[in-house]
Image: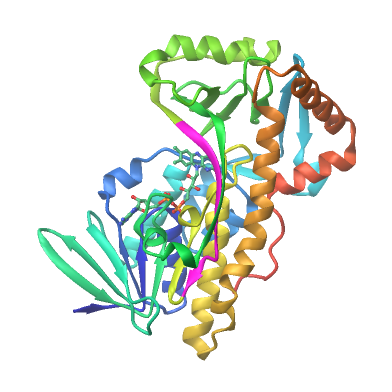
């Protein structure tokens, strides 16, 4: 029977980053991932990194390419009522955000782990976790046509919203909080230059639109769509037309169109489970919480959980003390709920929820107030760049 100190389920950004930081502190782990390495490395998702996430990736020795290739954004724009208003993140907070795709973060982490000789097991099927209320939990899985058992001291559930770890916890032991939004995001990725250097979040009476990017040559756009929309109903030309209609004219004129590289529809939800620790099982990242992508917090929250957990486990293996481990859930949840609040609020002022004219006037009044108040803008900016951490890195 194989053994490790920490069994990590899932090789997304949280699983890989946790494995690397533990390795740097002399803690052994095995990562079990149900998908192939190529699939995980090609998955297209988030793109905006807070400085705290950048710092953690650098600390993990996985930040070199990111520091060379990232786009540093000192602000973003809010489009509404036909105008575009710049939120000066640097001027308001002294901080900026970095645009660097999650796909690239994952590739960098994977290469760093593989170079360090990590035990990463891709295409591990039928993963099940048990005994996390005892000193030595076990993980069962099948791989290469054989079944395997791994014993460990701790299990880190880094297996995303649909993973097995949260589902293995008795429902009476946890409380879930959820808000499902009545719309989704239709995303298009294309190898065309973005219309501006920074992101543009646009509130429009037809629905929300976002101009984002992965590099100066690759743009990522989103338009709010109905939950029952099918991708087949959205040929590229329809997306480009709809996008331009929802942007301020000056921005719409600068949009360069081209064939899509990828298209997808994602539902929007806010979700948190409490607590995030059950005996010797921890929920990390999307396994424990989801935010709508407005505000770009999902990946950054996952990194923030990892930051708390690797410190707690490193401290446990160094001293035998369990205070940090026991405090994992409470410490993470304080940051998570603030990010859930920000993402929910940002979604609520930028998206179309109904045809109700009163709600529309409220949104426009809020945007008008926001862009005219340095106090309100500072609040937005400090949430967007990422709230400060309580503890320095170790
Ligand atoms: C379509 C989409 C678009 C997104 N866009 C944005 C965005 O623009 N901005 C933003 O901030 N965030 C965005 N997010 C959120 C962001 O990508 C996530 O917050 C981030 O991926 C969380 O990382 P994670 O490692 O916790 O989970 P994941 O990235 O979901 O990784 C979980 C891993 O676990 C594996 N796994 C699942 N079940 C099992 C199992 N039973 N056994 C073994 N392995 C398993 C999965 O294959 C996966 O590799 C988006 C998410 C999605 C789904």
Viewer-proximal residue, 115 or 248?
248
Q: Residue at x 45, y 49 (%)?
A: 105
Viewer-proximal residue, 356 or 224?
356
> Magenta segment: does it hold 352?
no
* Magenta part of the chain: 266-278
**Colouring of the image:** rainbow
Q: Position of residue 230 (x, y in %)?
A: 39, 20
Q: Residue at x 65, y 21 (%)?
A: 354
Q: Predominant secondary structure in magenta? A: strand
> Residue 252 vs residue 32: left or right?
right
Q: Position of residue 112 (x, y in %)?
A: 38, 60
> Residue 38 vs residue 176: left or right?
left
Q: Is residue 85 above or below residue 337?
A: above
Q: Position of residue 92 (x, y in %)?
A: 82, 44
Q: Residue at x 77, y 26 (%)?
A: 363
Q: Quadrant of residue 196?
A: top right
Rendered-image quadrant of the N terminus? bottom left
List the single residue furthest toward the front.
172
Q: Quadrant of residue 71?
A: top right
> Residue 39 vs residue 284: left or right?
left
């Amino acid at each position: 029977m194989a053994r490790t100190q920490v069994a990590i389920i899932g090789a997304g950004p949280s699983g890989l980053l946790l494995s690397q930081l533990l390795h740097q502190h002399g803690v052994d782990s095995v990562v079990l991932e149900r998908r192939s390495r190529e699939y995980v490395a090609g998955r297209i998702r988030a793109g905006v990194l807070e400085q705290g996430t950048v710092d953690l990736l650098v600390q993990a020795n996985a930040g070199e390419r990111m520091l060379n290739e990232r786009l540093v954004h000192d602000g973003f724009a809010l489009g509404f009522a036909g105008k575009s208003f710049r939120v000066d993140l640097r001027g308001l907070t002294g901080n900026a955000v970095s645009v660097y795709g999650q796909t690239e973060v994952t590739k960098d982490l994977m290469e760093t782990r593989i170079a360090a000789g990590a035990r990463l097991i891709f295409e591990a099927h039928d993963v099940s976790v048990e005994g996390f209320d005892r000193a030595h939990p076990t993980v069962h899985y099948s791989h290469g046509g054989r079944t395997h058992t791994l014993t460990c001291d701790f299990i880190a559930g880094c297996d995303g919203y649909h993973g097995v770890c949260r589902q293995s916890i008795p429902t009476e032991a946890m409380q879930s909080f959820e808000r499902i939004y009545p719309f989704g995001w239709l995303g298009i990725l294309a190898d065309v230059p973005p219309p501006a250097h920074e992101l543009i979040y646009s509130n429009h009476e037809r629905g929300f639109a976002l101009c984002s990017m992965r590099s100066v040559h690759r743009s990522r756009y989103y338009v709010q769509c109905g939950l029952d929309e099918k991708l087949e109903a959205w040929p590229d030309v329809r997306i480009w037309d709809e996008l331009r209609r929802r942007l301020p004219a000056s921005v719409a004129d600068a949009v360069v169109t081209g064939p899509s590289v990828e298209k997808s529809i994602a539902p929007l939800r806010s979700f948190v489970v409490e607590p995030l620790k059950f005996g010797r099982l921890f929920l990390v990242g999307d396994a424990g919480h989801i935010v709508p992508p407005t505000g770009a917090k999902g990946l950054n929250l996952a990194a923030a959980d990892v930051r708390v957990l690797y410190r707690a486990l490193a401290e446990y293996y160094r001293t035998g003390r369990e205070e940090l481990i026991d405090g994992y859930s409470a410490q993470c949840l304080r940051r998570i709920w603030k990010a859930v609040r920000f993402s929910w609020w940002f979604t609520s002022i930028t998206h179309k929820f109904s045809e109700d004219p009163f709600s529309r006037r409220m949104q426009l009044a809020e945007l008008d107030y926001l862009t005219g108040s340095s106090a309100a803008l500072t609040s937005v900016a400090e949430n967007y760049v990422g709230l400060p951490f309580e503890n320095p890195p170790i």
